[in-house]
Amino acid sequence: MKTFDEALSYLVSQAKKTRQTETVAIAEAMGRVLAEPVVSDVMVPPHDNSEMDGYAIDRMDLTHEDTFRVSQRIPAGATPEPLEVGTVARIFTGAPIPKGANAVIMQEETEMVGDKVRITAKSTRPGQSIRKTGEDIEAGTAILEKGHRLRSQDLGLIASIGIDEVTVYRPLKIATFTTGDELLEPGETPQSGKIFNANRYVLAGALPKLGFELIDLGRVKDTLEETIDVMKQAAQVADVVMTTGGVSVGEEDHIKPAIESLGSLEMWKVKMKPGKPLAFGQIQGTPFIGLPGNPVSAFATFNLFARPYLMRMQGVKNICITPIWLEADFEWPKANFRREFARARITVPEGEQKTVVQVYPKQGSGVLTSTVWAEGFVVIPEDQTVAKGDRVKFYPFAEMV
């Protein structure tokens, strides 16, 4: 039985980064992974400009007097004239600083005296309230690295240097299907001995959200022949094949013999709960990941194992999630030799001013309700208990999308 860390380290080490790239407009690049660094050809800001509305001044003039004539008005986007000696310029946020000025006095530190302006600021320093040319970005600087997964703020940053398209990796194609004659699709009539297919829709929601192209091959009958046929089809059209359930050695579990007839398969028991069984291999050269069949186990192993594998294969450089350390508002009195990932959420107890984490009262691997109630996983390390007030690691679900 592999430890959680051993299994994850091995799985990620087997991910072969895609080489297929394409160029897309930044408006279509949300969630995509950079295949090349983004380098700025311009300075940001492109010129010295005002941080606020006020008056541009040569601060040395303040050593002689405190009341000045306004010689020009400079809105954002204007090209100013050099500052006339002994005067100030009315200036607005983002407007270029005129030659000869070396400070901006905010309008709250001034007052009008007839048609002139009196400076009431107690002190003024060189460069005050001025954004310097290139202080945010120097020309020639790589603002985003290869392997960075683009967020909305990244798109804004790219736009700020005038770039309208980026080179990214093409989305991986992930083929999925579910097995089990006991499964019904939502909308079908309930039948004795059968359950509705939840795992199919967990993957159908998660994979596109992560930026992958989903190829859903539906439900497959529990026969070896049909399983082999759909495996071949999946391997031909996808970069990765992923299934849930059917990887045990029972007579009705055909995933294992089907893959072994077409490629190779490694099956592990991982020291974690939920989600002990995990399979990895290849089908005619295409990687395969087999997740457990229990809904919560499938959800957990997808996020904790499949996600980092797929993201590394997609070219993402940083696949780690930084945990939040929180105070436990629960008791976990029984130690387990496996690492446990309890479904939990953050809360502020009534009448208190501290943030704590609570766990769902039912932690069974079939209790999918726990994943909806929860906001993340609390980690219970191997062979450890947790007392109320202990510090525990919390991994938010929001960081896994």
Image: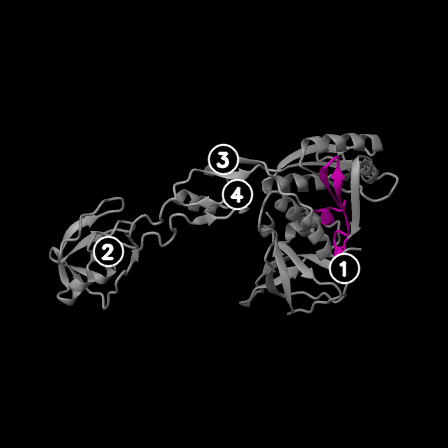
Q: Is residue 63 visible?
A: yes
Name the element at disc 2. Answer: strand
* Secondary structure of the residue carrying numbered label 3: strand
Q: Nearer the viewer, residue 376 or 369?
A: 376
Crowd class of label 4 (few under 14; some 14 to 19; many from 20; radius 10 Å): many
Residue ID for mark 1: 338
Query: Is residue 282 one of those drawn in magenta?
Result: yes
From the top left corner, tell me how far across and down residue 293 is, in percent: 77, 44
Q: Nearer the viewer, residue 39 or 253?
A: 39
Which contiguous range is marked in magenta?
Answer: 270-299
Image disc number at residue 54:
2
Residue 27 placed where, x, y %?
A: 46, 37
Q: Amino acid at mark 3?
A: Val
Q: Which residue is mark 4?
A: 34
| Quadrant of res 101 | bottom left
Q: Which residue is drawn at the image coordinates 80% and 30% (left, top)?
A: 226
Q: Is residue 175 above or below residue 154?
A: above
* Three-letter code for the amino acid on which mark 1 is drawn: Arg
Residue nearest the viewer, comparing 235 with 359 = 235
User: Mark 3 or mark 4, which is nearer the start of the sequence?
Assistant: 3
